[in-house]
Amino acid sequence: MNLRVNGEVVTVPDSVRTIKGVIDHFNINNPVIIVEHNDTILDKNAHEKTQIFEGDKIELVQFVGGG
Amino acid sequence: MNDRYSRQTLFAPIGEKGQRRLKKKHVLLVGAGALGTGNAESLVRGGVGKITIVDRDYVEWSNLQRQQLFVESDAIERIPKAIAAKKRLQQVNSEVEIEAHILDVDPQEFESLIENVDLIIDATDNFDIRMIINDISQKYGVPWIYGSCVGSYGISFTIIPNQTPCLHCLMETVPIGGLTCDTAGIISPAANMVVVYQTAEALKILTEDWGARREKLVSFDLWKNEESKINVSSLRKADCTSCGVHPTYPFLDYENQTKSAVLCGRDSVQIRPAKKEKRDLETIAQTLSSMGKVEQNPFLLSFTVEKKRLVLFQDGRTLIHGTKNISEAKTLYHRYLG
Ligand SMILES: [Zn+2]
């Protein structure tokens, strides 16, 4: 399945079906992350149940500490 | 009168009017690392009226790769970053009033530093202090610009009291915690990019061109060629304890005790005594010189013993290098410095 993640088209395996799956696919273990799915900001506890489909637009924004 | 700002005033959205406004403004810059030195240089060159720089650290060799105001002699002499930055900035533009504080700033000190400040720029390296900045911003109605970076990644967002969500709103959508310090390194363009976003927003705010503000949260990865701008206005919470209807400013309210913290990726622990009092570095140096190697400059004392290095600032704050173990660090602190 093709998704547009942070502006880039990426192909993820079919086993990836939810936002949580996308986060895991990219090995992101930062708990401080904001996800926008097709222009809507998701609630943190909606990551697991939000399904993704071909062509979805996803923005993953991580909060980091450095400076 | 020279034409120092002519190219900036030629830029129509700023113009002479914006330049006059900029000259009347006071920026509080928290942190003088990569983000701090970049922001400071741009604003000072641009002709901001006054800038107050607060930083707790001193210049080390590993800073020179990206912290643009520092030179080798600053690292050799371990000059505090606030002092080294001020020296260089004053050479860049003598018209700007520059105030430097060597300080691991706590909420009380913030309350005095915030007086007459028009904008706070975050150039810190941890969320403890950002949450304090966030509460100060809300309590005093002063905007602030969050920025951070690691590796090739960076993020920035401008927080305007009563308009945008605050950092507490944004962070509450996810658990606070897991904010571990990263040892992924940092490349200078990532820091510079965050600086670019921060200073552009700062110029808009300081010249009062509010309509030009970028309202979105921006993030990027310069190595993965990714960028993202998202609208987070829906995350503003009416019951937020920092910016909501009944704010309590929880991060300004912590008991005043000795604080110690492991510093990010540096094999160092900071000990901050409960009561700030000026230490007599001269006398301490004499006492310690029989036990190990003592080096000194007017701002701090460095003492090497047991393969550890203790760096004592005048206000009593101490960095213990060579350990990540807080209790070992405290033992060394009490053994040699009281
Ligand atoms: Zn809030």
Image (cartoon, coloured by chain):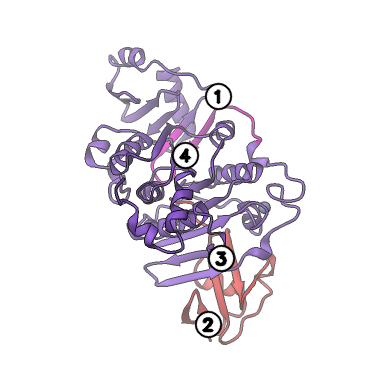
* Magenta region: B253-270
Q: Which residue is rendered at x = 36% and y = 18% of the image?
A: B281
Disc marking residue B216: 3
For disc 4, the marked residue is: B262
Q: Quadrant of residue B222?
A: bottom left
For mark 1, does the 10 Å Cα neighbourhood hold few (<14), some (14 to 19), or many (20 or more) residues? Answer: few
- Residue B254 in percent (x, y) is at 64, 34
- Chain ID, mark 1: B
- Residue B66 in percent (x, y) is at 31, 51
- Beta carbon of the mark 2 residue lies under 8 A of ligand 1: no
Identity of the residue furthest to the front in this view:
B1
Q: Nearer the viewer, mark 3 or mark 1?
A: 3
Disc marking residue B274: 1
- Beta carbon of the mark 1 residue lies under 8 A of ligand 1: no
Q: Mark 4 vs mark 2: tell me if same chain.
A: no
In the picture, which chain is purple? B
Q: CA distance from mark 3 to mark 2?
A: 22 Å
For disc 2, the marked residue is: A3
Mark 1, secondary structure of its residue: loop
Which quadrant of the figure contains the N terminus of chain B?
Answer: top left
In the picture, which chain is red? A
